Amino acid sequence: MCGIVGIYRFKEKAEPGGIKKMADILIHRGRDDEGFLAVDFELGQAYPLTGKDSKVQGMRVDEFRRPVHLFLGHRRLSIIDLSPAGHQPMGNEDGSVWIVYNGEVYNYLEIRKELESLGHRFRSRTDTEVILHSYEEWGKECLKRFNGMWAFAILDLREKQIFCSRDRAGVKPFYYLYDEERFSFASEIKALLEIDGFSVEPNQQIIADYLFAGLRDHTQETFFKNIYQLRPGEYLVFQGNKLIVHSYWDIDMKEVHFSRQDDYVENFFDLFQDAIRLRLRSDVPIGTCLSGGLDSSSIVCMANQLMFDEQTIDRKLVGERQKTFSSCFENPLYDERDFIEKVIAQTGAEKHYVFPRVENVFKDLPHLIWHQEEPFGSTSMYAQWNVMKLAKEKGVTVLLDGQGGDELLVGYLPSFYFLFGDFLRRIKIRSFFKDLKTYRKIHPIPAKRILGGTASALFPFLMNPSVLGVFTQDYDWVKREFFKGYFRRIPKARKFNHMLNDYLYHQFRNTSLPALLQYEDRNSMAFSLETRLPFLDYRLVEYAFHLPLRKKILQGVTKVVLRDSMRGIVPEEIRKRMDKMGFVTPEDIWFRTVLREGIEEILNSKEFAERDYFDVPKLKQAFISHCEGKRNISFAIWRWVNLELWMRTFLDGRPSSGRLGRDDHTS
């Protein structure tokens, strides 16, 4: 796991000091090594350069004086082949192709074997070199062979082009800036903000999407005007000062059918097991996140078998017992230790608990906001932040985590509204009432909410802000005149033959998962950790989407195929568990009590009033109503606070507490 940066200036030469600043701001992503490359496109010449943390010898980047238009930079977190042979930027034998890369291609050993049979020779044991030779052998088609997470830029001096790609699910980030002066890219937005002459401005449309719908990472745009991201499954080609973006992967609409019912479960089990096996490949210590839910418990239990029964990993990288990391609270409504302890008892794993303290929230927020870079959905990110910090303190460098299981296997209860809606659309009244009855038996949700959710699934236009406006009580705190023209609803794809599959696809590609993956990347990399997500193995993703719906959701039960495949592996209390918690915090209580004074200070500040987004008197009244227990609008409150603190950190021109303190917790 690493940080990559690059800048190509069209008119004037690029300065080595500029690429150094961009790389330095990403030091938390990789402290083990740094490297640079200066490139003269006209002469077809590349000049490898070093920095103060470089593990190889060579000219320092700050000593380079030759006029060039392109610089590449890299910060390395060593995971596979810890030797200097993994130094980046990495070039091929004749120096005609170079790469800067962030991520892991888990099937690199299998690809390497094939490449060696085709005559390629390797100087390292890294997956980086496998990508480099794969590009030499197969060109852009190499992307279809990789199983992993990645964001990379390949410089091809033969074609005078830069080829950049992001993995299928978008686990690793790739941001870029392209205007009349330059093309630049980076693993994090903050590196692009270091570019001389770039004007940092807010993207008002994305801010509106966030305030009204809690959306983020749902388009190629970011909260920063003129800074974009490659979407999952995309690549770009920069050639002749022109940039073109292409999609190389998507989920098709086919459905698998087997004559034996057991085949559905057995195939899922095999894919899931192999996804975890591949993600145990490491040369550094490895552990696992454990929330107590079905997804993380399945990974911990399965990984335990692979680690100790099948010995798929060097025991010295695990220890005598698998290390698990969990966020807990003394309030039982937000605590899952009863379930976690059942997994610990079954696996014998070494448990590590962290208890996020509300008293530390505002102290840690500057760091968290600086690392997250864009406003985020709730304080649940603070719970995850503490888990990552704990793992780092315990000497772990790689963590397995359960992100993606909910989006693939119908983990969110609103999914049932689309199931019910499709029954009604197809006039399957008997199926509707049968499933509704079993659903309400398992999940005692008020009928009014179920009907409202089903109606919104059937008639999504009713939820469009242009229809409802912000004329309801929930949005009476916004200044309508400022956001006039910004109200929109992101259209959902209509590519499957069932509303529920369309909903899952939308969650996977546009809403829930992209945001969760950004949180995961920033929180882990803040502590120089690599997180690996078995549920997002592309083979498992495709298989899950191709399953008949009844193998995922049946009579009020979610994740049917996972539950069936984990029989005898996961404790029965968890395998049959129907409630869901995840990384949560008691934020509604926090806002009413310990954090109330800090929030009021923000809402009463001059800066907040001058943003011109809010009807401040109405907003304050809404907050009082929340504090008095008359309503629960904690999600909205967090958006107000987070947006304000984000703007102070990145847009107001004041020194960021997060930036000033970025090394306090990562060294």
Image (spheres, grey):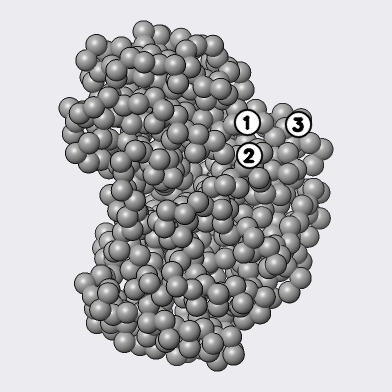
Residue at the (63%, 74%) spot, across then down: 595
Residue at the (29%, 17%) spot, across then down: 67
Where does the image place residue 164, in percent across and percent down from the top left? 33, 33
How many discs mark residues in the rendered view? 3
Residue at the (58%, 18%) spot, across then down: 55
Q: Amino acid at mark 1?
A: Ser
Which image quadrant for residue 10?
Answer: top left
Seen in the image, is 504 located left or right of residue 634? left
Q: Which mark is residue 282?
A: 1
Task: State the CA–CA distance, disc 2 to disc 1.
Answer: 8 Å
Instruction: Identify the element where label 1 is drawn.
Output: loop
Q: Amino acid at mark 3?
A: Arg
Seen in the image, is 571 located left or right of residue 116? right
Judging by the rendered image, the residue that carries numbered circle 3 is: 315
Task: State the CA–CA distance, disc 3 to disc 2.
Answer: 14 Å
Which dot, 3 or 2, sits closer to the camera? 2
Q: Residue 528, relative to residue 141: is it above or below? A: below
Instruction: Identify the element where label 2 is drawn.
Output: strand
Judging by the rendered image, the residue that carries numbered circle 2 is: 398
Between discs 3 and 2, the one toward the N terminus = 3
Between discs 3 and 1, the one toward the N terminus = 1
Q: Residues within 10 Å of mark 2 (few under 14, many from 20)?
A: many
Q: Residues within 10 Å of mark 1 (few under 14, many from 20)?
A: some
Where does the image place residue 626, in percent across and percent down from the top left? 55, 85
Where does the image place residue 358, in percent across and percent down from the top left? 68, 68
Instruction: Identify the element where label 3 is drawn.
Output: helix
Residue at the (56%, 22%) spot, across then down: 52
Q: Residues within 10 Å of mark 3 (few under 14, many from 20)?
A: some
